[in-house]
Amino acid sequence: MKRQSLFLYTAWLLSLIATVGSLYFSEIEEFIPCEMCWYQRMAMYPLVLILGIATFRSDFSIRIYALPFSIIGALIAALHYAEQKIPGFGGATACASGVPCSAEYINFLGFITIPFLALVAFVLITLCLCFTGKNRN
């Protein structure tokens, strides 16, 4: 398997794991997503389909379409994480779902929250997409 194929496959797999994880948290654990969580989902969910099709077609030019989703998703996740971890950042008012964006359903090791997991996924997907350029083998 060529290196660029491996990076594309990894990006797709990461988006799939992140999507299944978000559905697990909301549907199995019954965590109500806040507004920023929904925006992150809007950036992640299309990546599963876009990167999945590109992976099976070996279409490395997909990065021009996928990178905006992963970069915007990473920015939203970073803002969401900052709202959780920096006191007074953004104002912790409840959104339409009734859940404030500063709420932490999980907090492993004092820093691993759901937005942190999303941020890691978006950053890794972005890096993988950067290594799927046409001139790489």
Image: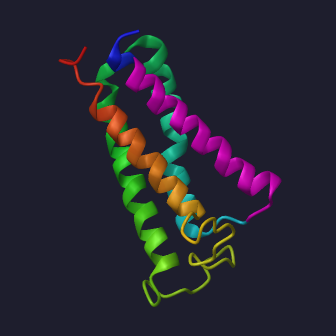
Q: Quadrant of the C terminus?
A: top left
Looking at the image, what colour scheme do you see?
rainbow
Residue 19 figure quarter = top right
Task: Determine if residue 47 is in view.
Answer: yes
> Taking 95 as reference, is 26 left or right?
right
Where residue 3 appears, as percent x and y from the top left, is 34, 17
**At 52% from the left edge and 51% from the top edge, which residue is drawn?**
42
Q: Position of residue 73 (x, y in %)?
A: 42, 53
Considering depth in this image, is 100 or 128 the residue closer to the camera? Answer: 128
User: Residue at horizontal 46%, vertical 51%?
Assistant: 120
Residue at coordinates 54% horizontally, 68% vertically from top-left? 111
92 to 124, vertically: above or below? below
Give the camera-side residue of 50 and 133. Answer: 133
Q: Which residues are magenta?
A: 6-31
Residue name at image x 64 percent, y 73 percent = 104
Figure label count: 0
Residue furthest to the top in view is 1
Q: Is residue 54 above or below residue 101?
A: above
Left or right of residue 64: residue 115: right
Q: Is residue 23 magenta?
A: yes
Q: Is residue 81 left or right of residue 22?
A: left
